[in-house]
Amino acid sequence: MSNSNRIFLSAPHMTGNEQTYIEKAFQSNWIAPLGPNVDQFEKDVADYINVKGSVAVSSGTAALHLALRLLDIRPGDRVFCSSFTFVATANPILYQGGVPVFIDSEPETWNMSPEALLTAFKEADKENMLPKAVVVVHLYGQSAKMDEIMTICNHYQVPVIEDSAESLGSLYKNKKSGSMGAFGIYSFNGNKIITTSGGGMLVSNDVKAIEKARFLATQARDKALHYQHSQIGYNYRMSNILAGMGIAQMKVIDERVSQKKAIFRRYCEQFEGMKGISFMPEADGTLHNRWLSTLTIDPGEYESSPEEIVLEMEKENIEARPLWKPLHLQPLFRNYRFYQHSEDYCICEGLYQSGICLPSGTGMSETDQQRVIRAFQSAVTLKVRKPMLRA
Ligand SMILES: *Cc1c(COP(=O)(O)O)cnc(C)c1O
C-alpha cells in the first residue's frame, strides 16, 4: 500500500510559516534549548489560555511529571486520575512512586465522573489517605465537568492538574481548558491539534511554581557560578528550533478548532440516518475542539465490533482506531483501585467496547473525508434480525 493515499488519524498540519521562525533560530545560531523562540512561544500560549505563567518542555508527559513533582508527590502518595485516557496521563504518577487510583467516566462528557470521584474521596477520607492531587483529563477535546470536580477537590483541599493534551482551544463556561486547576498541561506531539513535532507546556497562575518548574526542567542547577545541585532535576526543556514551529502553529489554533469542528459536522450529517451510531456529546456550556471525531456503535444494532471496523478501514488505507483502553484494564495498572460511576455499570469500559475514532486531520480534504465516510459505512454491518418463528 502506498503512503500517498493513506488517510491518517490526525496528521501534522503545517501553516508554511514555521520555517520563518526556525530560520531565525538558525541565523542567530540559537539552536540550543531555550532562546527567544521559547520565550515567545511560552508567552503566546499563556496569553491565549489567560494564565500568568508557562514553561515549554519536551513533551506533555514531562509537563505532567513536573506538575506532580511541584505538588510533592512522593512514594506511597495517592493520586486520583481519570481511567479513560492515554497511558501518558498516569505514567508520571508511577515515576514519582505515587499510587494511582482510577476514576470512571460519566456519560455526558465521557470524562471523570464527579459521583465516582466523591465516592473515592469519602473512602480515602475514612482511611485517612486523601490523595495529594487529582489528574483530570479533557478527552478528545471535551471538557470534564469542572465545576462539580473543583467543588469536591476544593472541599478536600486537594489540587487539580488538568491534562489538556487533547483540548487546547476548548472552553468550559468561557474558560480555556487547562486554566482552571492548579496546573494545566498541553502536548504538541505530532498528532495533536497543533504540533511542534514533539513538545509540551505546563501552565499555572502560580508564577512561583512555574519558576520552580523551569528550574527543575533544567537540571535543578542552584544559583552558583560552579555547577551545584541540591535537588533531582530533569532535562525537560523545549528546543528553540521546535518552539519556532510552535509560534507559527499558535497563530492558527482557532482556525484549527473551526476546521476540526467542520470535519465533525460533516460526519454528523452523513451518518445522521444511521441507527445506533452516537457521536461523543458536546456538554452544555462547553466548546469541544473535536480533536478527534469519535462515536459509539450500538452492539444491539450492528454485527461489527470497533476492532473489526478499524481493520476493515485499514484495508482501504484509512487509519481509524478504537477509543482509549481504560487504564484500570491495563496490565500495568491491574493492582490499583478503580471507582465506578454506578454500582452496576462501568461507563468507560462500555465506551471502549463500542467506540471508534475517525480520521480528523485538519489537512484532510473533503474528498478524502468522503472516502472515510464510504469506508465506514461499508465496514459496519447491521445485525440481521431473525424473523419470529410462528408455532
Ligand atoms: C498526547 C497525550 C499526552 C502526552 O503528551 P506527549 O506530548 O505525547 O507526552 C498526555 N495525555 C493525553 C490525554 C494525551 O493525549
Image: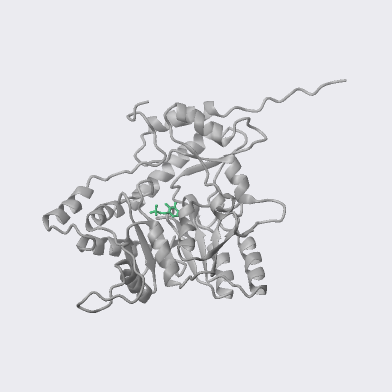
Determine whether, in the image, residue 367 is placed left or right of residue 107.
Answer: left
Q: How is the image coloured?
A: one colour
Across and down, in percent, residue 357 comes to 49, 41
Q: Report the front residue among 149 and 349.
A: 349
Look at 42% across and 29% down and name the residue there.
317
Across and down, in percent, residue 182 comes to 45, 70
Q: Quadrant of residue 51?
A: bottom left
Q: Is residue 305 above or below residue 216?
A: above
How many discs mark residues in the rendered view?
A: 0
Q: Is residue 216 above or below residue 166?
A: below
Q: Quadrant of residue 104?
A: bottom right
Q: Is residue 111 above or below residue 76?
A: above
- Please say whether residue 106 is visible from this viewpoint: yes
Q: Quadrant of the C terminus?
A: top right
Q: Residue furthest left?
A: 27
- Please say whether residue 173 is visible from this viewpoint: no
Q: Residue furthest right?
A: 391
Across and down, in percent, residue 379 comes to 53, 28
Q: Report the front residue among 366 and 38.
A: 38
Q: Report the front residue among 155 and 119.
A: 119
Look at 51% across and 43% down and name the residue there.
294
Determine whether, in the image, residue 177 is placed left or right of residue 36.
Answer: right
Q: Quadrant of the N terminus?
A: top left
Q: Residue furthest top?
A: 391
Look at 38% across and 60% down and name the residue there.
62
Q: Quadrant of residue 106?
A: bottom right
Across and down, in percent, residue 92 comes to 45, 61
Determine whether, in the image, residue 280 is placed left or right of residue 371.
Answer: right
